[in-house]
Amino acid sequence: MMRRHIARAARGGFTILEMVIASSIFVVLAYVLVAATRAGEGSQGAVTTTIERSESLRSARGSLANELRTTSDDVITVEELADGNDELTFMMPITVGGTNTWGVYDRSLGATEDEQNQEGWFIRYTVEDHEGCSVDCIALVRQILDDQEDVQEEELIVEGLSCESQGPAFQVEKSGEMWEIRVKQAGYGEESSGEEATFYVYTRN
């Protein structure tokens, strides 16, 4: 009777082979779960980045249009860069000492009205490699130039612009009575094909 009991107990346990197989299945399932989690996080990250970049593109469209709308064709210069992108430079109407003139008004230049209004200065929108980008990219930046055309301030406006092989990412041209501005972003991740904004601005002429 004792021997039968021992034999039944042995048959009720796991053999080494069964334990190895069970461990292997567990490892595979754990790997699949981790991979799926990482893929989900990556996909969510790509979606978040795409939304943020899209919002920056819309914001840039609004700020550039508002600034250009205040100026005059006489103080606008557009130059084509070596990579095919355009560089937009212009002045804004300002008041210095009670006199209307041209230059730059920007609150970031100082605390007083005299510091914020700089006669003979320029605003420039250009495309360049930028260390402030969250990914390797070229970016649209806004620069404030003094009367010697030295950069006094620079702000990242839109990152992740399309590369040279995909055509110009920033173009500015006169179209009849309006200025036509195009900004093109490259896609981020496999799910995004990029985004392009085209808008038109009348100056104060």
Image (cartoon, grey):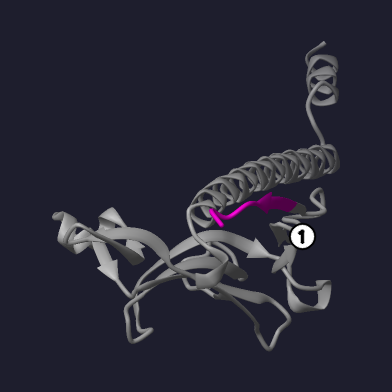
Image vertical order of residue 4 relative to residue 13, above or below:
above
Q: Which image quadrant for residue 158? A: bottom right
At x 72%, y 68%, the residue is 173
> In screen coordinates, is 95 left or right of 194?
left
Viewer-closest of 69 and 127: 69
Q: Which image quadrant for residue 81? A: bottom right
Q: Position of residue 205 (x, y in %)?
A: 56, 57
> In screen coordinates, is 96 left or right of 39?
left
Q: Position of residue 66 (x, y in %)?
A: 51, 48
Image vertical order of residue 139 relative to residue 53, above or below:
below
Viewer-closest of 203 and 133: 203
Which region is colored magenta?
Answer: 197-205
At x 80%, y 37%, the residue is 22
Q: Amino acid at mark 1?
A: Gly
Q: Which image quadrant for residue 164? A: bottom right
As for residue 203 lying within the magenta part, the answer is yes
Picture mark count = 1
Task: Report which residue position mark 1 lands on.
Answer: 176
Image vertical order of residue 15 relative to residue 155, above or below:
above
Q: Position of residue 85 (x, y in %)?
A: 69, 76
At x 78%, y 42%, the residue is 32
Viewer-closest of 52 and 36: 52
As for residue 142 lying within the magenta part, the answer is no
